[in-house]
Image (spheres, rainbow, N blue to C red):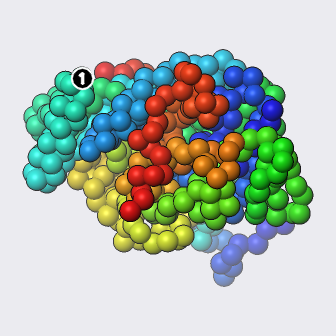
Amino acid sequence: MTTMIIGGGVVGLSVAYGLLKQGQDVVVLDGADGDFRASRGNFGLVWVQGKGAGCVEYSLWSRRSAGLWASFAQELQDLTGFDLKLVQTGGFEYFTIAAELENQVAKLLALRNASNGDYTFEVLDNVALKKQIPEIGPKVLGATYCPEDGHVNPLFLLKALSSAVQKKGGVIHTGTKVIDVTSTDAGFMVVLENGKQLNGEKVVLSAGLGAIDLGPKLGFRAPIRPQQGQLMVTEKLPTFLYHPSGTLRQVNEGGIQIGASKAELGLHDVEDVLTIAGLARHAIDVFPHLAKAKMVRSWAALRIMSPDGLPIYQHSTTHPGATFITCHSGITLAAAHAELLPDWIMNNNAAPDLSVFNEGRFDV
Amino acid sequence: MFDPIVPNTDPNAQVHFTFDGESIYTAPNTSVAAALLAAGHTWFRQMPVSGRQRGPFCMMGTCFDCLVEIDGITVQACVTTVTEGLNVTRVPQMHLQEGKFK
């Protein structure tokens, strides 16, 4: 029983690795270098704080994945030798505008209520925050802290997953753009851009934005769109920041990564000076000493957004054996995708209940 | 083998600058990185986290491994031209910290 996985980013490789651990044969079809690749441009957070406001199932799913991350990272390191530089010491969100801080606190309180009280966070004013992080600037009114937040080196993750899949016997075809997929008597056939055809009994569509075109061929609506995010990284600095935030984190080599804008620009993944300057301004507001730091790189990448921002997990109703997986938090959810999702893909008894994330919710 | 991008009209002309207090003479229109390499300096800075020594790799403004400090600002030595009396120092290392978590 071979499962063909269309899309070899973090989502597809996490699922591939999980299926291999369950004894499935897996072939991953990874696209071309010129494709839009969120797996190579993302911020690298394993993030819980604030996620799932209005949908506690998403909060719980994210937290479950974050909880699995330490053993997932250790397992990948043991198998491949790559240290993913996972740090889960909790994360801060910094606020320079009072109303935004109030909104955040209200959101976290609502999440705590929806979680029957099982949702830990703290609110710190500037003075309390300065005791934790002395470099904080005077414009920061306060911060919220969630102990379950963390970050990871997302490129090491991608590399480790690719290695792990191959070590477990999976096959990865790179530079293979899938242009068509159809049902056959024995399962599915995919057609590659180079004219080659591949057959398998099952298919998982985890092609990021590529699912916009391929989804309908398997009976999925795939109502997703690109959302641009811009990021930058500074020269390497001595370690001072021991906790990530949604916008600032110090990576293991010392660079400060600064993100991330949100813009609806279609398939446009080029950064612009105004947006990058805005990111730099925010970083300096939070940590004034960064004003002297050199920017080394800036880039833009495209998030894969559903209409409500939540993941989509959908079995095809018209093409049995086809599964559609998409989300904008492939790093946070990587552990869940590897450890929990395979049971759902294979319809095992141990499958998590993901019904709230099906495509039917977008029916009008 | 190599010709300067900006030809020197006076072959004997020299520019003087210092690197961590050391006196260095070089031809006009030379980049700080080229002048330091010619003076025998193979590493310009240390990695802030690991402490490993780093020097110019690309010499064209891309790799950021040639960073030095001039007038309190971190700059790329390979895209900075030496001027008379320039005071160049290594980026101060502030003590290298252990990667411990609070």
Above or below A66: residue B66: below
Q: Position of residue A144 (x, y in %)?
A: 20, 37
Locate residue A297 relative to residue A317 in the image: left or right. Answer: left
Query: Where does residue A278 sit, x and y in percent of width and height?
Result: 32, 64
Quadrant in which residue A275 is drawn: bottom left
Tag count: 1
Note whether residue A208 is visible: yes
Please name the residue shown 14% across and 42% down the image.
A106
Residue placed at 75% from the left, 57% from the top? Answer: A181
Work out whether A161 lies above or below A189.
above
Q: Pointer 1: what residue?
A: A118
Q: Is residue B5 above or below residue B22?
A: below
Quadrant of the snapshot with the C terminus of chain A: bottom left
Residue A160 left/right relative to A93: right
- For image coordinates 10% across by 37% down, the residue present is A125
Tell me if residue B84 comes above or below residue B21 in the rendering.
below
Give x and y (percent) for residue A341: 56, 32
A219 or A282, which is in the foreground?
A219
Displayed quadrant of residue A20: top right
Chain of the residue that carries numbered disc 1 in the rendered image: A
Q: Is residue B48 visible?
A: no
Closest to the observer, A282 or B36: A282
- Identify the residue at horizontal 82%, vertical 59% (top origin): A192
Residue that sits furthest to the right in the current view: A196
Asked if residue A224 lies left or right of residue A132, the reply is right
Classify the position of the N terminus of chain A by image quarter: top right
